[in-house]
Image (tube, rainbow, N blue to C red):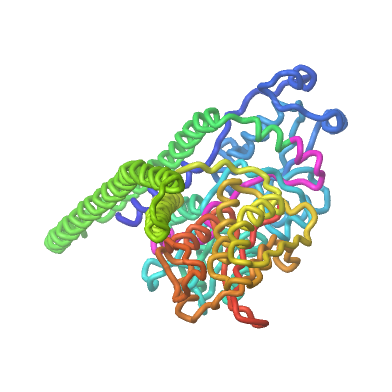
Amino acid sequence: MLKVISILLLSVSCGLITSVWAQPEPQVDVLAEKNVDSTHPTFSQEEIDWIKQHPRISVGADTHFPPFEFLNNDNKIVGLAIAYLDLISEETGIKFDIRSSSRWQDLMAKAEKGDIGLLSGAVATHTRREKLYFSKPYAAFPSVIATRDDAHFVGSLSNLVGKKVAVVEGFFEEDILRRDYPELTVVTYPSRREALYAVSTKEAFAYIGNLAIISYLIRSENFDNVQIAAPTPFNRIGLSMAAKDPILISIIDKVLTNVSPEKQNSLEQNWIAVRYQNVEYLIFGKVGVGLLAIVLLSLAWIYSLKRQIKKRKISEEELSLAKSFAENAKAQAETAKARAEDANSRKSEFLGIAAHDLKNPLGSIRGLSELMLEDLQNTSLPESQLKESIETLDTIRDAADHMLELVKELLDVEALESGIGQNDEEYVMLNTVLEDVVDFNRHAAEKKSIDMKYNCSVKNPVTHGDLGRIREILDNLVNNAVKYTQPKGQILVLLDFMEHNKMLRVTVEDEGPGLSPGDQAKLFGRFARGSAIPTGGESSTGLGLSIVKLMIEEIGGRTWAENRTDRKGSRFFAEFPRY
C-alpha cells in the first residue's frame, strides 16, 4: 500500500512540472495580422516566406510516451506535444501530418534522414545535436532509478557500479550514461516495458527512465515487485521539438517564447485532471473484471469452500491482523511525512525571518562603520590611536560583510534545494559573462599583485540557463582563486569547447596551496572548509562551492577540481551544455 501511495504521489509530482496547452482550432491566414499584434510572435520576412513555402509538415510522434504523446481510446495520437503542435499551427497556419510509431528509434532515424520534417517530443543530447536542431524546451520531466523492491539500498547512480543498468535503446538516458558514467554496465532494450520486465525478473538490477511512464507501467503491467528507488542527477530533462531545418526551429522558438506563464499554469491543471481521470477508469475496469471472476469462481466451488470455512476464518484473522499492521504503518508514515513537511516549512520560515532580522542590523552596522571611518579622517587624534581606531572599524565592517554574505548564501541554498526562487532561463553568451566576472575580480587580484589572464578559444559559446545563477557560478570560482593564490602569483581563466562531450568548459587555474585528499573528498559539501587559508585574510562561508554544484547541475552541467601537475596549485572546472 505504501509503495502504491509513493508511486501515485511521485506521478503527480511529475505531472506538476509539465507545461500543457489546450488544442485551439487552426486558423488559415494569420501571419500578416499577427505580425503587427504584440500579443503574437513577430516573424522575420525569411520565416514568413518559409511558412508560405511549407504549408504542411510531417511530424513523427511516439505512440507510447504518455502524457506527451500516446494513443487514446479512439486510436488517435494525443498528448502535451500534440497540444503544442496545435498552438504552433494556430500562430503560423502550418498544418501538421502526424506519423506515429511505437519505435522511437525509427522516428529518430527518419528525422535524421529528412523523411519526416519534425519530431514533436525529443530530448536534446550532444550526439543528436550533431544531426538535428532543437527548440527551447516546452516541458520538463524527471528521470529516476527503478529497482526490485527486495534490492539493496540505492540512493544515487554511484550505488549502481558493477550492476546491470537497463535503458531503452536510442533514448537520451543511454547517451548520458555512456558518456558521463562509463563505470556503469549499461544494457539496452527495445522498449520501456521490456526494460522494466528485465528488472522485475532480475535480468537487470535497475532501469533508468521517465518517472511518469515508469509509474504508469508499474500499475498497468502489474510490475508489483518494482519500485521507484531514487532520483538521478539529470532530474529535470527538457522536452523539445527537433528538425533538420533551423528556420523551422526558429519559428517554433518564437511561438514558445511568446506563451505567458499564466496560460501555461491554467492549461497544465486541465491536462493533469484529464490524464488522471483516464487512469481511474482503467483501475475501475480492472476491479470490475476481478469482481466478476470472483463471483464465477464462488459459484463453481461453493461446496469445496464450505469444507474450508474453518481454514478461511483462520486466514481472515491473519489477514485482519496484517491489515491492522499495514494501517498502523500507513498512519505512522503519514504522521512522519506531515512532521517532515512541517519541519521543512518551519525551516524555510525561520530562514526568511532570520534573513530579515539579520540583514537590517548588519546593514546598519556596516553603514555606521563607514560613516565613522569617514569622520576619523577629520579628527585630530594621535596617529597611533587613529590607526588603532581605523583597524577596529575595518574589522567591524569586514565582519558585517561576512555575515551578510553568509545570510545570502544560506538563502541561495534553501531556494535551490526547495526549487523556489528566481529562475529566468535564457540563452547566455558565456564568454561575455566570464569576461565581466574576470574584470570584476581583477581589482581584488591587483591588490595582491596577482597576474590574472583570460583566454577564450570558442566562437559563439552559447549556453542556456538563468543569467544571474550562471554569473554566480563563475564568480565563485574566480573569486576563490583570488582568495587562495599567493601574492604575486598568477591566475589563468580559460573557456574551451570539449569535442568529446560537446560541452563548454571553464577552467580556473590558481597558484594556491593545492588540495589535500581530505579537501577533495568534501570540497563541494555544505560548510566545507579545506585546510587552506585565504592568503589575504579574506573570509569564507564554506557555502560557495556547494552552491556552484547545485546551480550547475540544475542546468545539466557539472563541476569538479584537481591538483595541478605542472606546479603547486589547483584547477577548478565547470562544464555548461552548449546550445
The x and y percentages for residue 104 are: 67, 54
The x and y percentages for residue 227 are: 41, 61
Q: Residue at x 82, y 30 (%)?
A: 44
Front residue of this view, candidates 229 and 398 = 398
Magenta stretch containing residue 413, yes or no? no
Magenta stretch containing residue 227, yes or no? yes
Which corner quadrant holds the N terminus? bottom left
The span shown in magenta is 223-251
| Residue 489 lies in quadrant | bottom right
Drawn side of residue 219 relative to residue 68, left or right: left
Circle count: 0
The x and y percentages for residue 530 are: 45, 73
Q: Residue at x 86, y 32 (%)?
A: 46
Q: Residue at x 83, y 28 (%)?
A: 48
Front residue of this view, candidates 75 and 42 = 42
Drawn side of residue 436 relative to residue 560, left or right: right
Q: Where 511 falls versus 392 (above or below)?
A: below
- Inspect this view and state whether residue 11 appears: no
